Amino acid sequence: MTEPLYRQDAYLRSAPARVLALTPEGGIVPDRSVFYPTGGGQPGDAGHLRWDCGQIDIATTIKGEDGSVVLIPAEPQPLPPPGTEILQDLAWERRHRHMRVHTALHLLSVVIPLPVTGGQIGAEKGRLDFDMPEAPGDLAALEAALNALIARDLPVTEDWITDDELAARPALVKTMSVRPPVGQGRVRLIRIGAGADQVDLQPCGGTHVARTGEIGTVRLGKIEKKGRQNRRVTLLLG
């Protein structure tokens, strides 16, 4: 397994690691990773690796087998063999924008309290698809409510519950298309706000900003119809 440093500290930009293995497709499996692997609508991280005899750019990161993380080189070139000590450098600006968009999408699911049928995160924008038979009449009011939540500068923290506790609280799961990973005994929750100021709590394995104020002002694009009851809402970073 690869130790998920990205989950322990989403703000960690660089860290040493050791190469555990190389995949037949040319991927690099480290024993610990600052790179987030593609999942939950969030793209895999990019960056580069350095070691005594070379360096290589990483185009993206994916999940491997048995809890491993696989770093995908941008171009074919000699790879560090298993056992090599490497230094991981994250493409931080890109990742941080993913964090801002991801947290903003959690807040979007607060101002539009409907089941989520899909979603995607990018460095400039993100979107959520909702089970929404009719489009809301006042998009400007939704945008204002979303930016008001962001401006409250609420803390964003994590918590954990057991698989059984999650099964007993199905309302925590807002997404209809992607179910939280279960089977490992516990599930990670992302909480926005605390105590009486809590506004959201839902399962999530992605990376987030520490406070909502870090997101900055956002804009909402037009609401697109994607099927009889499915509507897509796009969010853009300011």
Image (cartoon, helix red, strand yellow):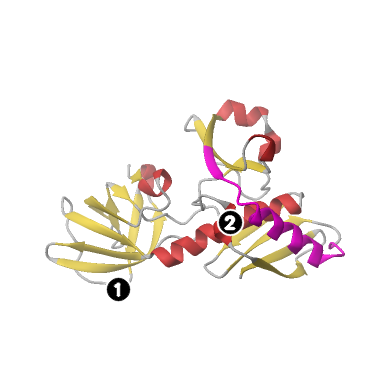
Segment tinted magenta in the rendering: 135-158
Say few, some or many: other residues with alpha carbon within 10 Å of mark 2 (under 14 / 14 to 19 / 20 or more). some
Q: Is residue 179 left or right of residue 48?
A: right
On the image, the x and y values in percent for residue 122 come to 54, 66
Residue 212 lies in the magenta stretch: no
On the image, the x and y values in percent for residue 218 come to 65, 66
State the residue at coordinates (16%, 67%): 54
Residue on which the image places disc 2? 213
Quarter of the picture containing the C terminus is bottom right
Sequence order check: which comes first, mark 1 or mark 2?
1
Q: Between tags 1 and 2, which lies in front? A: 2
Say few, some or many: other residues with alpha carbon within 10 Å of mark 1 (under 14 / 14 to 19 / 20 or more). few
On the image, the x and y values in percent for residue 56 come to 25, 68
Q: Quadrant of residue 155?
A: top right
Disc assigned to residue 75? 1
Mark 2 secondary-structure assignment: helix
